[in-house]
Image: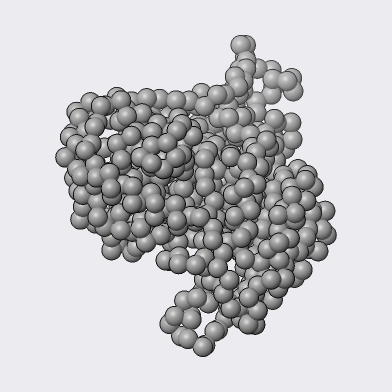
Amino acid sequence: MANVETERPEFRELPGPAEPVDPADPAERPLSAGHLIVAQLEREGVRRVYGVPGESFLDVLDGLHDSPISTVVTRHEGGAGFMALAEGRLTGLPGVAMVTRGPGAANAFIAVHTAYQDATPMLLFVGLIPVADRGREAFQEFDLTGWFGSTAKKVVTLDDPTAAARVVAECVHVARSGRPGPVVIGIPEDVLTLPAGPSGGVRPLAVARPRAAEAELKELVRRFERARRPLVVVGGEEWTAGSGQELMRWATRHSIPVLADFRAYDAVPHDLEDGPEHGLEGTGAYVGSLGYGRGDHAARLLDEADLTVFLGAPRGDVLSDGYTRGLDSETVLVLPGDAQGHSGRIDQFVSAHAPTFVLDLVTASASPDADVAWFGAAREAQARFTTPAPTPAPTASGDSGGDTYVDLTAVMAVLREELTPDAVITYGAGNHALWPARYLPHRAPASLVAPRNGAMGMGIPAAVAASLAFPGREVVSVAGDGCFLMNGQELATAVGHGAVFVALVVDNGCYATIREHQEGAYPGRPSGTRLTNPDFAAWARSYGAYGETVTSDRDFREAFLRARASGLPAVLHLIQDPAVRAPATTTV
């Protein structure tokens, strides 16, 4: 039987009465269900809730009034949901969003879908109509199970006020356990005001972190020792500096290339600082990522490996180029639950928490006799692929750049020099994301927030949450003009709550990803992809943020330094050539 390692978040003990309560004494009056929800969130270690207020959960808002939990008031429920998702990804505890019924819940749906496909812990509280009004098409009546049942780990409605603390504890446990994900909790407005008892909550539930049995480790060691071209693919959540570094040291020592799943690039450090190995100083075993924007060398590794070990990441659609690569190689899958999301061959399945499994693996004395030349070629290809080398090309107007457009490859070269080692990078979906994914290295865990399901509009809310969660860390968001304005209004939230980051808004006047597909399938017939943009720098300044427009590569570094030094949320409006779709030689 496998060992199980458990952990429990820190919580604050809330006193319960030693004697029967006197209802006439306000100090001993039972908590309402709404206030008890807040008390339990405190015990679970929640530090912030994100939301748009609604009359359907006024009692919860009242409970938050005197709580140490910060209430971050957002400008749209989609922004609130994305902030909660970002908090969950960065901290490991479920991020919490609160919205009202009907339109509010519908607006938050995008974040729930993202959290489900991305396997990120999150709680969404939805204020509901009074219980007696159900089934009568009451104002903003909303069927939670009908809407969220197929894209949440659990959907529950609180009908018993005395169960408020238990329900919250159970939902936090579900969101964090096994394959993490979102949980939706309905809170009827009349139930929230009912007495819930004098208790200050319940003890948080321990979360199992399953570990591999000794026999499973020995079997995997034998597989590694037989393989000539073993490959490791990492992904998922909760990677730590220790687990990532230990894996990379072990993989480098044994000439095993390590790839990352799509938008899980921060699972392991991209370089090591403990000396030269195999002739490439400081580069370690990280050889790139899979999915959109991947290098051709990464795809070849997946095709050529004779053993592929997936740590925390199933072999899914995007990773395998649409279920076309690596499906038939010898495969070991390490996931904390079942094989959900995995396609193709499985020769060994280990139900284990991947970051913890790594620490067991490196002490299991595996000594593979791997193909050193194959490993070295992969590292050299990765080094070439990720080195910014701007190559001027004719623009839509015939201009080669200069003072007309900003080359994003040159921008990435500056960021590689200027960003702090633990900087957090955020972005949404679109062609603009190809540049940071390719050129910006990650050296610390919890340093990337980007939607694995391709949801637009996530970058700015994620930057807000990252700055609030890690006030001492640098945060940079790379946003396309289409992606930015889907939740750009959350710049107001950043100003109001003291979040500080630099957002690079790439303005090419179109939905570039869709335009690129049109150019391939319907050449010369662009349709429905043109954008009309504001002056983003002036727009930012109107919010009280820093704003500046950049039209030349030569001006970017100083503009970035000014934005960083402003101490404000900042927007740098970068004018990009409308004809550019991706970095040179990128395969999408």
Q: Is residue 459 above or below residue 19?
A: below
Residue 238 in the figure: left or right of residue 19: left
Q: Furthest residue to the top? A: 18
Q: Which x, y percent locates residue 289?
A: 41, 53
Q: Is residue 569 above or below residue 220?
A: below
Q: Quadrant of residue 422?
A: top right
Q: Residue at x 54, y 51 (%)?
A: 440
Quadrant in which the C terminus appears: bottom left
Q: Residue at x 42, y 53 (%)?
A: 382
Residue 142 in the figure: left or right of residue 402: left
Residue 347 in the figure: left or right of residue 286: left
Q: Quadrant of residue 207?
A: top left
Quadrant in which the N terminus appears: top left
Q: Quadrant of residue 16?
A: top right
Q: Is residue 427 above or below residue 214?
A: below
Q: How many numbered circles does the render carry? A: 0
Q: Which x, y percent locates residue 299?
A: 33, 59
Q: Furthest residue to the bottom? A: 524
Q: Is residue 54 visible?
A: no
Q: Nearer the viewer, residue 400 or 165?
A: 400
Q: Is residue 200 visible?
A: yes
Q: Which x, y percent locates residue 377?
A: 33, 51
Q: Residue at x 48, y 81 (%)?
A: 519
Q: How is the image coloured?
A: one colour
Q: Nearer the viewer, residue 483 or 119?
A: 483
Q: Residue at x 21, y 49 (%)?
A: 306
Q: Which x, y percent locates residue 102?
A: 60, 59
Q: Nearer the viewer, residue 43 or 572?
A: 572
